[in-house]
Amino acid sequence: MYFSFSLPLSASLCLSLPLSASLCCCCAGMNAAVRAVVRMGIYVGAKVYFVHEGYQGMVDGGDNIEEASWESVSSMLQVGGTVIGSARCKEFRSHEGRRKAAHHLVQRDITNLCVIGGDGSLTGANLFREEWSGLLEELVQQGLIDEEAAQNNSELHIVGMVGSIDNDFCGTDMTIGTDSALHRIIEVVDAIMTTAQSHQRTFVLEVMGRHCGYLALVSALACGADWVLIPEMPPEDGWEEQMCQKLSESRSRGSRLNIIIVAEGAIDRQGKAITVNNVKDLVVSCLGFDTRVTILGHVQRGGTPSAFDRILASRMGVEAVLALLEASASTPACVVSLCGNQAVRLPLMECVQMTQDVQKAMDEKNFEEAVRLRGSSFNVAVLNVGAPAAGMNAAVRSAVRVGITEGHKMFAVNDGFEGFYKGQVKCSVARLHPRVTNQPRPSSVSSLPVGCQAFECLLQLYEARTSHEDFCIPMCVLPATISNNVPGTDLSIGADTSLNAIVETCDRIKQSASGTKRRVFIIETMGGYCGYLASVGGLAAGADAVYIYEEPFDIRDLQSNVEHLTEKMKTGIQRGLVLRNENSNENFTTDFIYQLYSEEGKGVFDCRKNVLGHMQQGGAPSPFDRNFGTKIAAKAIQWISRKLKESYKEGRVFANTEDTACLLGMRRRAMVFQPVVQLKDETDFVHRIPKEQWWLKLRPLMKILAKYKTSYDVSDSGQLEHVTRVRPKKVD
């Protein structure tokens, strides 16, 4: 289906759209969802309302239900929590309370409700919808509304977005707020690890997750914790002895620190709670280690939302409005979810039921079912190729350790292929401090290149197999580049960290202008010829315009953008943000655009420019990149192990088929091995970009949310489908 929102909408598509926050909890990223719903709603001709303080505001009515404007959601992207408030509401759980809420909505002709919250909030919304016609009849009988008002407001449409740091809602890969919570956890763990190593201590950390161990498990993977305890997978009997033995062995190998992560809802096989103090006492009594406890608490809910959460919430908000536009009397209430990199709509109550089934399975101590519902020797060399990207070390660490467990001898190649040529091959140990050994025979080495240029190099190695049999070994490329320009994968290791660096910088730059009126910032990002960082970073930072190579522009476009910003300054929004990819146009440079904006905006706004440069390549990797690198490298090593066994004949490895030289990439939500030779036709080798890039479909969203008149192709938007078509999340 295709909506051209630049055309006038018919009266039937005009709607009043209230926005309600969660019943009880807030999380980072909710404000981005609020902003997207308001601006997309206004864009399609709707009248949009805030409902302050969640369902309580709907029950109380009055000033709690306030019409929203385009400007009222400005400067919200970087703010944590929810600016429209959130509260528990016992009254809404009663029939009388829901009748009051219905009365207040009918008074404003509101018949569409967007709810951001957890399964409790969404269940309440669905009940409200089911009772709607009966509530209107009661209001007519009581004389509070007339028959005409009841007829005009006869249908209530509901769409939900899930806001929960626990990532405990079935049917979606990620909930709004989860990634930001992981950022808070990893920031704390990184700080604690320096203290632990200095003092040779053991730290036991409690993270949130009363019924869901997602935060604990993923943060444990991201920081390399020694032990993790989560509610869905209680440890086997005798775990205390096993854990202490593991910690003791770690110390005997020279480690000066131990990290144990415990979900707040962790239990043993008998259902008894396992607390951080229990774990601390166990370590002290059995091992005598200096042990400290840290409970992160509500720090995990707060803070600035990550780039991922801003983008996710913005996409979900837009999709929610589209879902309401298409809703009819026969359409069940839906929840907007994430499937891979696609927004999809699923029946709300089926997702809620599946989520409740998880808790039921855990209550019955059927932990295997709970996990199912949540959603599984040779010499091997690892080398990095091309520019560094945050998360590479996580991938190398994972590859080495998984390779060792598979029975292989793992080697690290210093300085990429040049180091391999010069024989700079070292045997890797668990902590990645290599010691020099004899160089292995090339015919017995399986290769695991990491990086963007590695794709092109591996293709050359594959093509050289006909003349050099030494290259007839299993080879696999892991995509690692901040530019996210590797063919065959939707995401690359390092891109998320770089996006967060861009967004954090943009936030600071915008904040620096808080005391200055009418200022426009021109910011140059990296990316080569790929506009991913500029485009997706612009969406997350609330940019007014983004210039990239993939979308050609001319002087008329630049002039139009200047005029747009000039009009924006007249509405009371005093700041502008323009991003430019470094190779977007050889003539329209950052200096040229800065000078053009400065001249054309004279008397209306002034300009500043910033070139972010290599700061986008540095810093600590984000939780996403740590986990992505860890999981993708582990999967690659397992694949290499399998291919080695399949191709081992007559005392040597000989692998010369297409499927033994692959790139492991993420396609939507699946990890896929793709022969590099088959990716040739998908690649623009001159500009080092894929010929088709999924994220280009997000560019209209950025323009819409910046108040441009544009068209939005929603042919790939998430249409309503049965929840069983989306596999539940797994915790492995």
Image: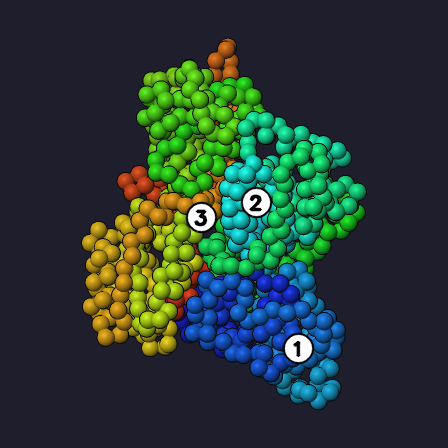
Closer mark to the observer between disc 3 and disc 2? 2
Reading the chain from its start, which is encountered first: label 3 or label 2? Answer: 2
Image coordinates of residue 731 in percent, x first then y, are 63, 43
**Mark 2 Cα-neighbour bin, 10 Å: few <14, some 14–19, many ≥20:** many
Q: Which residue is drawn at 58% across and 38% down?
A: 201
Find disc 3 in the rendering and name its residue. 496
* Image mark count: 3
Q: What amino acid type is highlighted by mark number 3?
A: Asp
Image coordinates of residue 457 in percent, x first then y, are 35, 30
Quadrant containing the C terminus in the rendered view: top right
Reading the chain from its start, which is encountered first: label 2 or label 1? Answer: 1
Label 3 with label 1: CB-CB less than 8 Å: no
**Mark 3 Cα-neighbour bin, 10 Å: few <14, some 14–19, many ≥20:** many
**Mark 1 Cα-neighbour bin, 10 Å: few <14, some 14–19, many ≥20:** many
Label 2 with label 1: CB-CB less than 8 Å: no
Question: In the structure shown, which secondary structural element does the residue marked by tag 2 occupy?
Answer: helix
Image coordinates of residue 476 in percent, x first then y, are 45, 30
Vertical placement of residue 640 versus 500, above or below: above
Instruction: Return the residue found at the far top.
Output: 650
Closer mark to the observer between disc 2 and disc 1? 2
Say whether residue 160 is visible. Answer: no
Mark 2 → mark 1, Cα distance in angstroms: 39 Å
Q: Observer-nearest residue: 498 or 547?
A: 498
Q: Which residue is drawn at 58% across and 78% down?
A: 64
Vertical placement of residue 187 versus 561, above or below: above
Image coordinates of residue 297 in percent, x first then y, are 62, 55
Find disc 1 in the rendering and name its residue. 59
Mark 3 → mark 2, Cα distance in angstroms: 16 Å
Q: What amino acid type is highlighted by mark number 2?
A: Ser
Q: Observer-nearest residue: 300 or 310?
A: 300
Q: Which mark is residue 219?
A: 2
